[in-house]
Image (cartoon, helix red, strand yellow):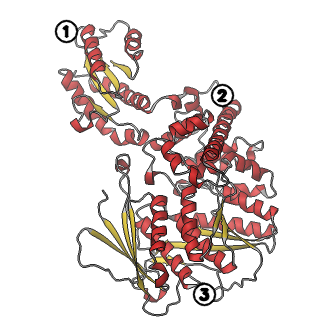
Amino acid sequence: MSACLHTILCNGAKPPFGECPGRRILELESRVGVQEFRNVRLDLPNFIRDVFNLPDRFVDLLELAGYVFAADRLALRGSRDAVEYHRWAREFEFVVRVRDIDFWQKEEVGHALIKALCFMTGDRSYEFSFQEMPEPYSPSLFSSEEFTLSGQNAAIALFSGGLDSLAGTISLLEQTKKHVCLVSHQASPRIAGAQNTLARALSSRYPNRISHYRFPCTFRSQTHRKEETQRSRSFLFTSIAFALAKAYGEDRIYLYENGITSLNLMRREDLSQARASRTTHPKSLRLLEQFFGLLFGRRVCIETPFSWKTKAEVFDLIAHLPNSDLVSSSVSCSKLFRASGPSSHCGSCFQCIDRRLASFTLEDAALDGPGNYALDIVIDPPPLPEDKTTLIDYIRQAKEFAEVTPEGLMMSRLGELEDIVDYLSNCSGELEGVRKAADLLNRHGRQIQQAIKKVHADLYDPYTKPDAGSLLALTASLEYLLEPNERLARSIAGILRKAVPSMFRDKKPVDEPDLNQKIHGLLKSHYSDLRSEHPSASFACAGFVPDHMRISTDVVVESKYIRQSTSPSKARDGMSADLTNRPAGTYILFAVYDPYHAIKDDDVLRSDFESKGDCSVCILR
């Protein structure tokens, strides 16, 4: 269950209930006329000369989308440690003052809105109640800048400033004669700078073909942002685009995102629900279409021309289009706060890894060189343990996809496919959807494999040991082929080899329980780092495993102490008994402390037990 219900009061709405201690109440206000309470900034420059050319329900929509996005960023999902064990879901209740209250109070409208938001964000529940705006009010989200809509044939395209949106915009300009309206949500100065730079460059190269509509949705300086996942940004983004489409008399918008990113299949079991972005997931987009169709009173469409392309194929497309030199100015990074100096990308987030590896499939590597990245994953060790995990997860999944078949996809990803196949574009049925999805994943996997081979062929130096954790080191050691439990056991063994000999240099453990207790304390001090690097596998020391965790603990550390009076055969018997009695699915790391060198042949002991599977032996002296 979530900690409490978040109640969001918007536009001066009054709470429809009395005192209730279980609620967390948050008031959001964007109206310029109430400066004392204003904590959200919503602006849409260069929209229309007369704001009332836009129907009231669309003005309401833009404010509502801004408030949903603001609440999303102000309501913390949970600590990182809690992520693996809980749904990471919240409960929201919005109370909003609106102009077209008859429309918003329709049951079908509320149902469509809630259904879209719950799936897109992964939150547990949304509720909406609407109150009538008490007086005529010109909303603050429109600036006084004038722009006259001339009735030209327009294409409304979402423009994030990333590689995919840049490639889509250039292809739209090259393939059509339409006037292209770029819609940008500007969440930070660096993102806004990239979007504005690209829009100006495109405007100069395609004169009188482009209009750039920028929508800052931010907080006043005193408001502290708590949550950075921003799962609701797709609702905000598409709301702005459809409001603009309404003003232009259009009933479709264009969204350019490659299919691998949109499907975003889980890379490990804990990346589910809100842990995985569903911003451009096929089901999210179809549910949004249904909701926006109610606002328009007719069917609307979110076109996704890149839904069957991989990132490498988007790179190949833009490489063969005019103006591909703009690629270096596009920004795909999801953790820009970690970018430094002249670099436009952090280099270690999932989006950076995807873009960097996909660029190695290009003939012209200079199109997106390492200078764009603060960290070069090829040669640099990742700065944080979770960054290494992100890279390993990416490579493991690419290997899985390179070998996938439609039948295998159905068997291994049935739960995820249920939320995909019925919502895919350009598919005549479920079987064709599975086949096309498998083909997309297969191409992506093979392309990444080829990229890694090219990295090794071009950059691997057989006379220099690569830095641990770098792409060269990981692929040389094949660490990504190990199961999560074995990877965790190896990391624990590395800690033990480093610490235990010095820990007991002057004073040996009293007995095996004493050894176990001290190893438990040692690993507890490394818990956060181990959980960051290995979020999909849990561990505990034997004798310290809580009863409720005995079945679910993935790795158990069993300590064996061979003293001067202890025969190694006794330790062997204990290890054999531990293997026999362990819960199904548990991996055992045997930490064998042998300070007197009683074990005659380490390799024989290791092979005797490790050949049985799901265990490893770490001998400590």
Residues 167 and 113: in front is: 113
Distance in Å between CA atoms under marks 2 and 3: 63 Å
Q: Quadrant of residue 511?
A: top left
Task: Give the label on residue 565, or none.
Answer: 1
Give the mark nearer the N terminus: 3 vs 1: 3
Q: Secondary structure at mark 2?
A: loop
Q: For the point 36% across and 56% down, which residue is it? A: 78
Distance in Å between CA atoms under marks 3 and 1: 89 Å
* Residue at the limit of the structure toward the top, as seen here: 600
Location of residue 208 in the rendering, given as x and y in whole percent from the top left corner: 80, 75
Q: Amino acid at mark 1?
A: Ser
Distance in Å between CA atoms under marks 1 and 2: 49 Å
Task: Give the label on residue 461, or none.
Answer: 2
Give the mark nearer the N terminus: 1 vs 2: 2
- Looking at the rendered image, the disc whose residue lies closer to the viewer, 3 or 1, is 3
- Residue 186 shows up from this direction: no
268 left or right, relative to 439? left
